[in-house]
Amino acid sequence: MQKLISRRVQDVVKEYLNVFPAVVILGSRQCGKSTLIRMMSEELPEMLYLDLQNRDDYAMLSEPTLFFRNNADKIVCLDEIQQVPELFSVLRSEIDRDRRNGRFILLGSASRELLQNTSETLAGRIGLIDMTPFTYEELYGSSDFDINRFWLRGGYPDSYLSENDEYSSLWRESFIRTYIERDIPQFGFQITSRQMLRLMLMIAHNHGQLLNSSKLGESLGITHPTVKRYVDVLEQTYLIRSLPPFFANTKKRIVKSPKIYVRDTGLLHQLLQIRTFNDLLGHPVFGASWEGLVVENVCSSVLNAEFSFFRSATGEEMDLIVQKNGRVVAIECKASTAPQIAQGFWNAVDIIRPDRTFVVAPVERKYEIHENVDVVNLGDLLLSLYDIFE
């Protein structure tokens, strides 16, 4: 049996239940939403959980208004809510009839339809929470934590907690196939499984690089507006992250295209057929993979911040810029225990003028290389960011 690992979002859910009649938890399939609710059910014994993909559970909602009123004394949790979009109007009426907070928990796999319906019919009545697979801060400190295993396998619980790398790889292969063959059609998007797989493979090969929709469209035989629409599908379902450019107050010509990442490094490595950490060490994506690991964990852990990257046409570059509460932090990623800093980095620091700058590398301890510029590992980076933005 897999061990249960505490999720950071658990406290956020409890807080939102005290503020909103309905709490919506959005995240990719298999990121741990249902497990989170099972863990919380021990603290919230009045919870009633229904999986809308289960025929028996679905049948209980044949008369939803009657069901909700008959269970008004319970917290009703509806999993895979996007499967029954017509429920949103019923939920709105029921919430308006009884505005008590903490009545409903809705779980969804981040479909466009789900986001549209919640924003239109439950506006002002819900608290939206994004949930990710395991993050570094959730796993760090456990007795068997190994950052290389986390880096290789990614954060999906069934992948990270697998008995060995082979089983983890098999799980990720099945996840990708199921996503392409079943989930995309269920979300209502008209794209063939072959096209989606090719697009995901091309994004994996361009991980951490600028999005070039025209080039991708030429390779796939589709128009670049169609590529942008498909990329939007992947982003809305939490499979990829696009990072917008940072526009500094400078006369230099700045690139305007976003950078694109496969959000989970385990899925990235599976798409590229990287099976072991030794395979990763020898693969051209090694540096970009480390960058993606850092970017995803920072973006998932630092809440209510703005994230971007900086790159000029003349070579000045910074991998990640975090802005929050009027403060600016610049982050450069180096997948080396002895990172070499190029002049373009220092030029970027002079242009951006951040409050603090970090070079994030797989080092054992942090050290200073210039005033307000430190080399740190991922854990120390996250701790520093919490202190800066506190």
Image (spheres, rainbow, N blue to C red):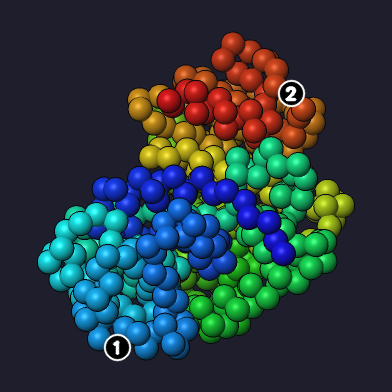
The front one of 71 and 284 is 71
For mark 2, does the 10 Å Cα neighbourhood hold few (<14), some (14 to 19), or many (20 or more) residues? Answer: few
Q: How many marks?
A: 2
User: Which label belongs to residue 313?
Assistant: none
- In this view, which residue lies farthest toward the left? 97
Q: Looking at the image, which residue is at 57% across and 56% down?
A: 133
**Mark found first going from the N terminus, 1 or 2:** 1
Judged from the image, the secondary structure of the residue bearing numbered disc 1 is loop
Q: Residue 371's spot in the image, x, y percent?
A: 59, 11
Judged from the image, the secondary structure of the residue bearing numbered disc 2 is loop
Q: Which residue is mark 1?
A: 62
Q: Residue 52's spot in the image, x, y percent?
A: 42, 79
Q: Which residue is mark 2?
A: 365
In this rendering, is residue 73 above or below 209?
below
Q: Image quadrant of residue 108? A: bottom left
Say which amino acid is labelled 2. Answer: Arg
Q: Residue 61's spot in the image, x, y percent?
A: 31, 83
In this rendering, is residue 350 above or below 121?
above
* Residue 211 visible within the image: no
- In this view, which residue lies farthest toward the top? 371
Quadrant in the picture for the N terminus: bottom right
* Residue 177 visible within the image: yes
Q: Residue 279's spot in the image, x, y percent?
A: 85, 56
